[in-house]
Amino acid sequence: MNRTAFSRSGRHFLQLAAALTLGFALVTPAQAEFQGGGALHDFNGCEAYGLSGAEPIRARYSPGERTGETASQISFFWPSGGAFNLTGYRDFDPTRQWFRAGGHGMYGGIYSWTPRPRIKILERSVLDPTGGAFGVADIIFMRVRIRHFDGLANCQLDADLMLHWVD
């Protein structure tokens, strides 16, 4: 094998290794987080992209205020194999105010969302223990509104999530 052929194959190997590493990072659970599932629904402005009705998803939520991180993250996993991650450098508490987040996806490739998504936390309720504080919650319900979903301009939807704490 000549030097040029080795250089090209080595570069392709490194690209594949980087893609696999990021792919596993998107789907491998953190040490402590909420995990569960729910549905994406109330699509508005998404019809041209083929999104309508309700879409079942698996989800995980890593709250920065509970894990000691500066960022909070929500990840969605489609039954077809796609994975999407939203990262915000703030607590995801239900302020009902829009804020910017970083959006990334893995579906036929790895990409960043442009335009950047906007998120509004409509609800975050502790279901177990009943009446408990978020810091000790075992089961929560979240409703998240996302604008520019998957980088699709003006595509807005709600995500309803039922999640349990996993150490």
Image (tube, helix red, strand yellow):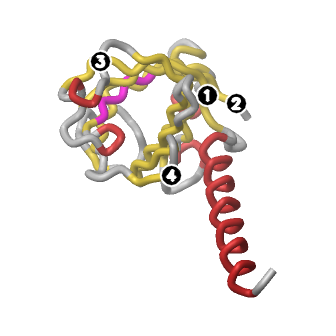
Q: In this image, 159 relative to 65: left or right?
A: left
Q: Which of these two is toward me, 159 or 48?
A: 48
Q: In this image, 156 relative to 28: left or right?
A: left
Is residue 16 placed above or below 49 in the rendered structure?
Answer: below
Task: Pinpoint residue 28: horizontal percent, then vertical percent.
Answer: 69, 42
Is residue 84 placed above or below 40 in the rendered structure?
Answer: below
Task: Pinpoint residue 157: horizontal percent, then vertical percent.
Answer: 29, 26
Q: Which residues are magenta?
A: 142-146
Residue at image position (50%, 56%) is 70
Is residue 76 placed above or below 159 in the rendered structure?
Answer: below
Amino acid residing under circle 3: Ser
Report the disc number at residue 110.
4
Residue at image position (73%, 35%) is 167
Separation of disc 4 and disc 1 at Cα? 23 Å
Q: In this image, 146 relative to 15: left or right?
A: left
Amino acid residing under circle 2: Val
| Residue ID for mark 1 | 35
Q: Are marks 4 and 3 in contact (CB under 8 Å)?
A: no
Residue at image position (77%, 85%) is 2
Report the disc number at residue 166.
2
Residue at image position (56%, 40%) is 62
| Residue ID for mark 3 | 52
Q: Which of these two is toward me, 118 or 44?
A: 44
Precedes in sequence: disc 2 or disc 3: 3
User: What element does badge 2 sit on?
Assistant: strand
Separation of disc 4 and disc 3 at Cα? 24 Å
**CA neighbours of label 3 inside 10 A, class few (<14), some (14 to 19), many (20+):** some
Separation of disc 1 and disc 2 at Cα? 7 Å
**Image quadrant assignment for residue 117:** top left
Precedes in sequence: disc 4 or disc 3: 3
